[in-house]
């Protein structure tokens, strides 16, 4: 079971949490907010010789990058990347114990990040118990297995498309905000220049008063 470790993100940063536990295979998907100058760690109990996969992606914030680090029970670094937008790492647990992986935004001074990760522990159990024996599957069972695998692929594609859509929407909103600020600045500059031109033209066409001095005899 995935456990949240101590970090500086705080409970207010959670957006969504999906925890799926099925027999020997576990998959944890989490989307959370990582503030600037913050670090968030998670812990997972893993049995030796279990195949695991860590996949993450930065959805919003700054340059869409984050530091990621994965450590074993003995503190050995299994994976370490700096300022990555997205990545996937697969490993096999070398021993029993608690594995820790952390996401860091400590290099950012004012930009919050929204990070998604999917941590899979173990492999999915067989759909039919007969797969463990040397017996052939029936045509219906084979069709069910194929449909099951196809549905898992569909779920993965849907997840990636949702992440890409969220990232694209964030970039579009950021671009829209910048364009709005730029338009306001252009309007102010245009107004100042127009007023200056009015006063300049007015000074050209204003009547100049002449002063006549009479000298008495």
Image (tube, rainbow, N blue to C red):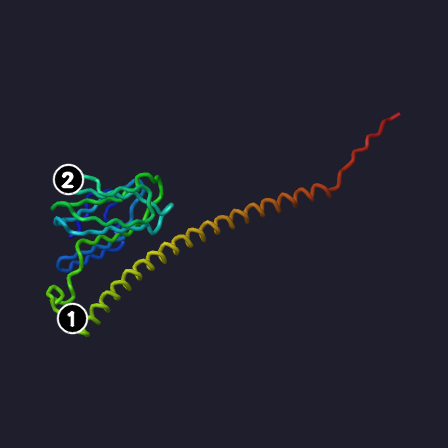
Q: Are marks 1 and 2 in contact (CB under 8 Å)?
A: no
Give the residue at the far right of this rendering. Answer: 217
Near mark 2 (Cα within 10 A), the count class, few <14, some 14-19 or many ≥20, is few
- The answer to whether residue 103 is left or right of residue 217 is left
Q: How many marks?
A: 2
- The answer to whether residue 214 is left or right of residue 202 is right
Near mark 1 (Cα within 10 A), the count class, few <14, some 14-19 or many ≥20, is few
* Place of residue 215 in the rendered image (x, y in percent of width and height, measured from the top left): 85, 27
Residue position marked by numbered label 1 in the rendering: 137
First in sequence: mark 1 vs mark 2:
2
- Mark seen at residue 74: 2
* Place of residue 131 in the rendered image (x, y in percent of width and height, measured from the top left): 14, 65
Q: Secondary structure at mark 2?
A: loop
- The answer to whether residue 96 is left or right of residue 199 is left
**Between residues 89 and 155, which one lies in front from this camera angle?**
89
* Place of residue 216 in the rendered image (x, y in percent of width and height, measured from the top left): 86, 26
**Between residues 69 and 91, which one lies in front from this camera angle?**
91
Q: Identify the residue at horizontal 15%, vertical 42% (top origin).
A: 73
- Mark seen at residue 174: none
Q: Identify the residue at horizontal 26%, vertical 66% (top origin).
A: 150
Q: Quadrant of residue 105?
A: top left
Q: Nearer the viewer, mark 1 or mark 2?
A: 1
Q: Secondary structure at mark 1?
A: loop
**Between residues 132 and 41, which one lies in front from this camera angle?**
132
Give the residue at the far top of this rendering. Answer: 217
Quarter that holds the C terminus: top right
* Place of residue 32 in the rendered image (x, y in percent of width and height, measured from the top left): 27, 51
Q: CA distance from mark 1 to mark 2?
A: 43 Å
């Amino acid at each position: 079971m995935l456990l949240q470790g101590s970090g500086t993100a705080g409970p207010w940063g959670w957006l969504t949490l999906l925890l799926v536990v099925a027999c020997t295979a576990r998959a944890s998907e989490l989307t959370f907010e990582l503030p600037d100058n913050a670090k968030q760690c998670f812990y997972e109990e893993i049995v030796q010789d279990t195949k695991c996969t860590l996949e993450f992606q930065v959805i919003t914030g700054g340059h869409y990058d984050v530091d990621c680090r994965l450590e074993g029970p003995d503190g050995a670094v299994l994976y370490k990347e700096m300022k990555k937008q997205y990545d996937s790492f697969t490993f096999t647990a070398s021993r029993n114990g608690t594995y820790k992986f952390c996401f860091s935004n400590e290099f950012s001074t004012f930009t919050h990040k929204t990070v998604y990760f999917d941590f899979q522990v173990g492999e999915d159990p067989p759909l039919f118990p007969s797969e463990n024996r040397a017996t052939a599957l029936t045509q219906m069972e084979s069709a069910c297995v194929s449909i099951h695998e196809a549905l898992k692929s569909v779920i993965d594609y849907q997840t990636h498309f949702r992440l890409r859509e969220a990232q694209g929407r964030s970039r579009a909103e950021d671009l829209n905000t910048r364009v709005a600020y730029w338009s306001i600045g252009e309007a102010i500059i245009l107004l100042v220049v127009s007023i200056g031109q009015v006063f300049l033209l007015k000074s050209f066409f204003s009547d100049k008063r002449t002063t006549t001095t009479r000298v008495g005899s």
